Amino acid sequence: MPDFLLEIGCEEIPARMIGAAAQELRERVVALLTRERLGGGEVASFETPRRLAVLASGIAGAQHDVTEQITGPSANVAYKDGQPTPAAHAFARKAGVEVAQLETISTPKGEYLAARVTRRGRTAAEILAEFLPKEIAALYWPKNMYWRKTNERFVRPVRWLVAMLDGEAVPLEFDGIQAGNQSRGHRILTDMAVSIPRAAGSAYVDALRNAKVLGRAEREHQIRKALDAASRTIAGARWREDKLLLDTVVNLTEFPSVVLGGFDPQFLMLPEEILVTVMRDHQKYFAIEDEHGKLLPHFLAVLNTDSDPQGLIRHGNERVLRARFNDARFFWETDQKKSLLERLDSLKQVTFQKDLGSYYEKTQRVQRLCSWLNEQLKQRGITVRPGVVHKAACLSKTDLTTELVKEFPELQGVVGGLYARVQQLDKGLPEATRLSIADAIYDHYKPESTDDAVPRSIEGAVLSLGDKADTIAGMFALGLVPSGSKDPFALRRQANAVVKVIAEKKLPLRLSELMRDARTGYQKSPATSKFVDERKYAESNATFFRERLEFYLRDVCGYAYDVVKAALGADADDVGDALARAQALKQVLHMPEFQAIGAACKRMRNILRQADEKGIARAANFEALPDSAPEEKDLIAYLHKSGAKVEEHRNRKEYLQALQLLATAREPVDKFFDKVMVMVEDQRVRANRLALLQTLLKEFSTIADFSEIVTEGKAA
Amino acid sequence: MKSTTPSPLTFQELILRLQTFWAERGCVLQQPYDVEVGAGTMAPETFLRVLGPQACKVAYVQPSRRPADGRYGENPNRLFKHMQLQVILKPPPENVQELYLESLGAIGIDLRQHDIKFEEDNWEAPTLSAWGVGWQVMLDGLEITQFTYFQQCGGVDLFPISAELTYGLERIAAFLQDVDSIYEIIWARDPDSGRVVKYGDVRLADELQFSVYNFELADVDKAWKHFELCEMECKELLERYGELKESQDSHPVPPKDGGTREGHPPSIKDKLRFPLLGAYDLCLKCSHLFNILDARGAISVTERVGVIARVRALAVGIAKAWVDQQNAQTKGGSEQTEPVAQKKTQPRKETLSPVS
């Protein structure tokens, strides 16, 4: 049971791609070993910026021999007068056996010739040499290249290959490179080739460790330890945890260490957001904070080398950061020369989308849409300060013209908020109002992902909704609906944000109304000539937002599939209401009553549909007729008794109580269906019963589409 | 002085060392191209050399003008015109990364004392319809070089590919000399008197005056006219080459008016002597005029995309024609008889200096 090692030595692989590629290569090797009946023990991966490796322990040295029976021509054809015919000879030749070794077997179709053939298992070395190159070539890369031949593609040029079974090299070739047992160590810390003695995991890992190359987990551990140690040299300080940054630096190093650097404390007058963005996004440094979370004038840089004996590396990094901070301060100061308000006009020069006009026009639409939102919320008892929203909307995009945002596009919104905080926006504006405006601008791109927080204030939330609804409306009206992986304007992310803001701020808004009004904002735009008609617009929006709401309920709130389907089956337009219904449904869905009610709902729906198809009329209202069956009368009585109460709960959005009450309908409903025939000859009775079913079904399905439950359960 | 060598290199020594290093490794040292370009990549020594099958190794310093980046000489890190040292290795040798690291040793950087990283950075130039993949090379947190494997240029898939190394000379010099402002870089030191000339002495006026010109005084209407004239002439040249190409492809055709030398049917020779390099200069002028107009704020956002597309159309047209011309040259060589084959080398002498 030999151990197998494969190492693809490569020029530096982009940090963001290493993890997924290593995992895929491992999976491909596992699948290959399984398919070729060579599978054995553990299969581990090992990856650094310059190599992807897979270590498979205890694989089969060769496939087992396999004996198969091959069926040949029928016995009638194969023998004449007891003598083998040419057909028998041909078959024997094909199977590679003597005619005398052929057997006759019985099959349902009669007697046939058969041969037992033993296929010799191939060695692991043969199989790996043949198939691994294809697996390597098939690895997925978000962006790849060619360097030797146009049809050979990989993420960066491959420079060496190690493929070994125990101590023996496997004769494998990929892109003109012959595999052997020679790997390479750290670029700078060692210049020698590294001989791998054996394929065993420990031998490989040790050989590389001696050559200053560590595996992923070891690098992460070493970085964390070094970050801790460096932070401890400053009293009360800690480094700011940052998973993404840590991942990046782990994948940029083969042998990491950390240096602590400092910067002039006077840069702390710049907002922390800017300092951190420069350090994290541009320099890949970790920020350091004190025990209260306040930024300290230090940073931690992760190096791809073992030490900085002369302090040159620290010095160099400090120099770069100083230049970057100087730039940021220069931009900050330059930007102050022109207030946000004065920048409003320049937005006419900034295109929002080629058909939808400039950001100036967008600003005007968003202001209008926000006013409408304010009005809606006010009518439903939610107080929004219209002046704050209006001013924030007006200034929300002006930071796009600032030097700072041109330099750090990821800080749009944040920069506007920071500038609004230090500028006089209007004469006589109270301090508190100004800060609220600043906060709303600062937050209005939020939430940027499902993990991100929603805007802090209601005004920020309204602006966030207005901005995003305007974008989605414009794109959908142009027919630019996201499909599959095509979503260049990140409309899904924006719609997810709309749903999340409405849900978490508990806003009584209907998505369809929001989107209808958002489209109205484009009325005077020349783009309307390219717009799809309103029905198509409403339909594509409804489908799109229903998916987003489904995603929110399932992936963010964690509701089960059928709960979500049932809840959205009743209505997917009122986010808060859908949430409340899903919440209640989750608690009662397991009750047997609802399984039965689900079946009954399906039945009612079918009956009503068939009646419609046949053009059979139903009564406007149902009533207890003299010749009504007792079960029918009971059900009517039940509806009269409970209907109003259910209605009351529903109006108060007490869905759990409403559902618990509805559960009691099971008995009269079941009895009704057991004993009463709906589609009877008597027209009056029939119409009355249909009206009864209609009311009943409506009663149930305003909370959930219970038929969705049955399809998943076992009660059907 | 926090550098690894006792006396850090002056700016001109830095250039000399890098040039010597690459000359010793077989590169032809070209001189800077004499038409305004935004990057060393745009010089014909890169843009045209990377096309077609011929191997090539070349290195040159290219002053690169980016009007919008000017800061009136007030910002210590930003320049209207910076200098790149550009190396093209076609095809790239297997040890190209190691060669590059060696070149850092040649300018006094002891890698054992520093932190070097190759971080993903894929290059793309929409105006040239060109792209490649590669890295930004980070030295102690400073980006000192763009390292790119070209994949496409002028919309043409490349084979063989080229490796392009672009050293940011000001950044490297400021690093070596440990100064915080580009203008403080020592450009030259008089060996006798020890007197130094700084970057600011050589270039500050340049930065100030061109910032004023590019941001304030460049005549927008005239720049547009220049742009249109250059574009028109470039297009006309490409059209004429296109006519040559067509008549070449099909059988004897009566000479078109102005399409070839009068009275002669078009021949490979007509094609080989056709001034595509002249057309490319016109394209470069358009690109630079676009940059000036952009810095003047004369191009609205909506126009911008359209103007870039116009420049790209020229670059793509030239790249395709250039490949065709190169092919004609190879074909011509194999088909024609001795005396003509001798003449074949003529056009190349007129155009680009031969390359090892």
Image (tube, coloured by chain):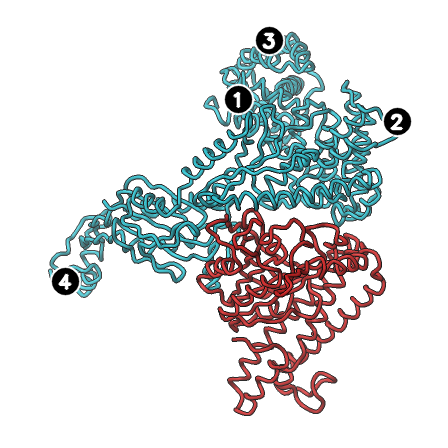
Chain colours: A cyan, B red
In 3D space, how far apart are the residues under numbered discs 2 and 1 (Cα atoms)? 66 Å
Q: Are marks 2 and 4 on the same chain?
A: yes
Q: Earlier in the sequence, mark 1 or mark 3?
A: 1
A425 left or right, relative to A534: right
Q: Residue at x 82, y 47 (%)?
A: A526
Disc on res. B48: none
Residue identified by numbered label 3: A634
Residue B263, horizontal then vertical, whole percent: 70, 91
Give the secondary structure at mark 1.
Answer: helix
Which of the pair A602/B158 is nearer the observer?
B158
Residue identified by numbered label 4: A84
The answer to which quarter of the image holds residue A202 is top left
Which of the pair A444/A189 is nearer the observer?
A189
Which of the pair B300/B140 is nearer the observer?
B140
Q: Earlier in the sequence, mark 2 or mark 3?
A: 2
Classed neighbour count for the residue bearing mark 3: other residues with Cα under 10 Å, few (<14), some (14–19), many (≥20): some
Label 2 or label 3, whichever lies nearer to me, is 2
Residue identified by numbered label 2: A428
Residue B97, horizontal then vertical, whole percent: 48, 58
Which of the pair B156/A630 is nearer the observer?
B156
Which amino acid lies under the numbered mark 4 shown in the image of this protein?
Answer: Pro
Classed neighbour count for the residue bearing mark 2: other residues with Cα under 10 Å, few (<14), some (14–19), many (≥20): few
